[in-house]
Amino acid sequence: MLKQERLRRHVNELIAVCYIVAFALFIHGLAGLTGPRTAARGNVVAGTGMVIAIVATLLTPGTSNWLLIALGLVLGSIVGLPAARRVKMTAMPQMVALFNGVGGGAVALVSWVEFRDSSGYGSTRLTWPSPRCSRRSSGQCRSGGR
């Protein structure tokens, strides 16, 4: 039992280190995208970070959506790779805008799912006035602002 607990702790530490390395590679990759000479290398570095992040996610205990993750990777590759290879250099800004829009849509969907699964605002008690504001009738806070 003690060996299993120790192994579980080491796996969790490995996953955390993988996420930190992936984060550092994302930042380094973005820095490489600032110029045309370093853009290809920046893409490779950021892509390596993404592979590490995906592997860390799949190693996380309790990850049950392996099929959904694989489906997303396959569909994204089927749509994205041919589009990226066929685009002319003069249409690159439009392609980047399209990819950013699709990425933003994905973030919105993930945010909605997390909001729904975490009971949304149901677990947070909203109060008015805020705790730092004590004079309700005058509308002034202790700091002097509204």
Image (cartoon, helix red, strand yellow):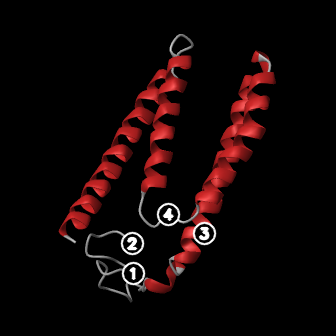
Disc 1 or disc 4, which is closer to the eye? 4
- What residue occupies the far top of the structure in this picture? 37
Residue 19 picture location, percent across and down: 38, 46
Q: Which mark is residue 113?
A: 3
Label 3 to label 1, Cα distance in Å?
37 Å
Q: Earlier in the sequence, mark 3 or mark 1?
A: 3
Relative vertical location of residue 44 with respect to residue 127 in this rendering, above or below = above
Q: In the visual, does 143 lie left or right of 130?
A: left
Q: Which residue is mark 2?
A: 146
- From the image, state whether disc 3 or disc 1 is nearer to you: 3
Question: Dividing the image into 4 quarters, which one contains the N terminus?
Answer: bottom left
SS label for mark 1: loop
- Say which amino acid is labelled 4: Thr
Between 37 and 133, the one lying in front of the other is: 37
Circle 2 residues within 10 Å: few <14, some 14–19, many ≥20 = few
Q: CA distance from mark 4 to mark 3?
A: 16 Å
Q: Position of residue 18 (x, y in %)?
A: 36, 44
